[in-house]
């Protein structure tokens, strides 16, 4: 015979398992498509320069414009997501970015490249924070770290497969009168549209709408999340309006740390193929295969870090270790020969990619429920400006010096400063309060 508390625990565990089997894999697939469309220009860079006249600085500027638009439209997108629901809004985001990405196949000038990259950023704005917020409404804190790690792993999976996928698409040069890079943009953009339409039929905006959960599972999941929200509210030291709470100094510190993480992620996303090309004897196929190695290592590291973070509860020590690993690996990659540099970039990728899911668990856990959605949007939009600074800065440095070595040094310093900044964070613990409220004591 099972007691009511045991039945509740069983229903909660079953519900969480269903979320991990149905929702998390879908979000991983969506993020893979997202990252393919966001970063495929890294493999098209040399061809865009040859066919369209887009040099290194112009390429870096265009790659970075994406993040300016992303920052401008991030918060409005999240406000609209709260109004229309995740089901409708995430589908809209994905279909629109797929169409814009596919349109990049027709770029014919640097200005057109700039416009399309800006529109791609506007189309994608709100996707990542919407998913992170979705987890806060569908999973208790004890499982969000692993879910976030699995989700963010989608970006590393995309980076790992983008090389092997891009090489064959680029090799279609001349087929049907199109360049290989046009096939690359067109095919990957179309994939996003198809997956986006399919996502509409799998997603639910609220737990109450999920037909694939039983009534007892819905109740257990809702109660667990509500108890955590109530606990956070009771220990929330902030007063005043929801928007005034967004001015907390801690929020600015979150933005800086995430900015530093994004610097490393997008510098490598857009310039890793260029770094790998320094290895003698490489071609489109081998560059793609070798460029996938750091991201494969990152996927493994992210999953292990996510599990360790869920067990530890306090993710800050692990985040410091991840950022130090990123900084040391990047610095070593800048001072050694090309082959060893690839090995150290694998180490760096394990650090900065693991840092991302570890980081997101901290604001989810420590910020008031009243501001979680807009706060995530603010952190993501301002932090993602690192995606503008990194590719543009690397392009400028390469044009001026002929190498990206100095850019790698700057990334290493940013990662080390971010590690120090994490030590300034103070994370409250609402877990004990949540358990008390859930048990009614």
Image: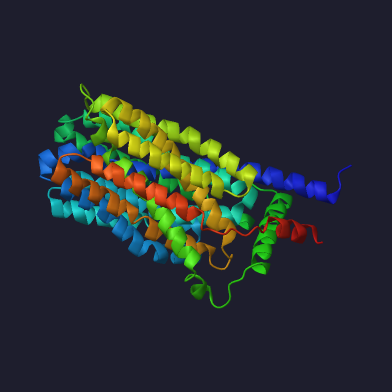
Q: The N terminus lies in which quarter of the figure?
A: top right
Task: Tell me the quarter of the image containing the C terminus.
Answer: bottom right
Which residue is drawn at the image coordinates 17% and 31% (left, top)?
173
The answer to whether 136 appears left or right of 292 in the picture is right
Q: Residue at x 57, y 43 (%)?
A: 146
Q: Is residue 65 left or right of residue 303?
A: left
Q: Position of residue 156 (x, y in %)?
A: 41, 38
Q: Is residue 362 depicted above or below 267 in this figure? A: below
Is residue 271 toward the left or the right of residue 360 in the image?
left
Identify the image quadrant of residue 324.
top left
Residue 335 position within the rendered picture, expressed as x and y whole percent measured from the top left:
28, 34
From the viewer's perspective, is residue 430 above or below residue 41? below
The colour style of the image is rainbow
Q: Position of residue 253 (x, y in %)?
A: 45, 61
Q: Nearer the viewer, residue 325 or 270?
A: 325
Furthest residue to the top?
281
Residue 194 visible, this angle: yes
**Figure check: 422 above or below 23:** below
Left/right of residue 429 with respect to residue 297 in the rendered view: right
The front one of 87 and 343 is 343
How many numbered discs sit on the rendered protein?
0
Camera-nearest residue between 379 and 237:
237
Q: Is residue 127 visible?
A: no
**In the image as oriented, which residue stretches furthest toward the bottom?**
240
Residue 202 placed where, x, y %?
52, 47
Residue at left offset 36%, top offset 43%: 35
Q: Nearer the viewer, residue 215 or 142?
A: 142
């Amino acid at each position: 015979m099972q007691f009511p508390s045991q039945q509740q625990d069983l229903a909660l565990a079953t519900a969480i398992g269903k979320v991990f089997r149905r929702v998390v894999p879908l979000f991983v697939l969506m993020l893979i498509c997202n990252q393919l469309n966001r970063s495929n220009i890294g493999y098209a860079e040399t061809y865009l320069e040859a066919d369209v006249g887009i040099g290194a600085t112009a390429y870096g500027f265009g790659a970075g414009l994406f993040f300016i638009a992303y920052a401008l439209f991030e918060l409005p997108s999240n406000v609209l997501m709260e109004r229309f629901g995740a089901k409708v809004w995430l589908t809209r985001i994905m279909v629109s970015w797929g169409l814009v990405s596919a349109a990049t196949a027709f770029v014919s000038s640097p200005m057109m490249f700039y416009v399309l990259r800006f529109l791609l950023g506007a189309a994608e704005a709100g996707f990542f924070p919407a998913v992170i917020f979705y987890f806060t409404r569908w999973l208790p804190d004890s499982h969000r770290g692993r879910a976030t790690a699995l989700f963010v792993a989608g970006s590393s999976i995309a980076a790992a497969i983008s090389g092997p996928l891009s090489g064959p698409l680029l090799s279609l040069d001349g087929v049907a009168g199109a360049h290989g890079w046009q096939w690359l943009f067109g095919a990957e953009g179309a994939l996003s549209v198809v997956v986006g339409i399919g996502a509409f039929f799998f997603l639910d905006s609220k737990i109450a709408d999920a037909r694939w959960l039983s009534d007892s599972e819905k109740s257990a999941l809702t109660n667990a999340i509500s108890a955590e929200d109530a606990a956070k509210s009771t220990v929330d030291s902030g007063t005043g309006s929801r928007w005034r709470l967004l001015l907390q100094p801690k929020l600015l510190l979150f933005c800086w740390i995430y900015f530093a993480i994004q610097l490393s992620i997008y510098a490598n996303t857009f310039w890793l193929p260029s770094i790998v090309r320094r290895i003698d004897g490489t071609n489109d196929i081998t560059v793609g295969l070798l460029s996938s190695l750091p991201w494969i290592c990152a996927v493994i590291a992210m999953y292990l870090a996510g599990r360790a973070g869920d067990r530890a509860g306090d993710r800050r020590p692990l985040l410091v270790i991840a950022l130090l690993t990123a900084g040391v690996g990047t610095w070593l990659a800048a001072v050694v020969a090309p082959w060893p540099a690839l090995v150290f970039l694998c180490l760096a990728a394990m650090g900065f990619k693991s840092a991302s899911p570890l980081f997101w668990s901290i604001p989810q856990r420590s910020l008031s429920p009243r501001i979680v959605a807009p706060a995530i949007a603010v952190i993501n939009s301002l932090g993602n400006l690192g995606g503008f600074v990194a590719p543009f800065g690397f392009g400028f440095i390469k044009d001026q010096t002929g190498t990206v070595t100095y850019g790698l040094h700057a990334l290493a310093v940013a990662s080390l400063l971010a590690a120090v900044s994490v030590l300034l964070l103070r994370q409250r613990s609402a877990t004990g309060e949540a358990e008390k409220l859930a048990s009614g004591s």
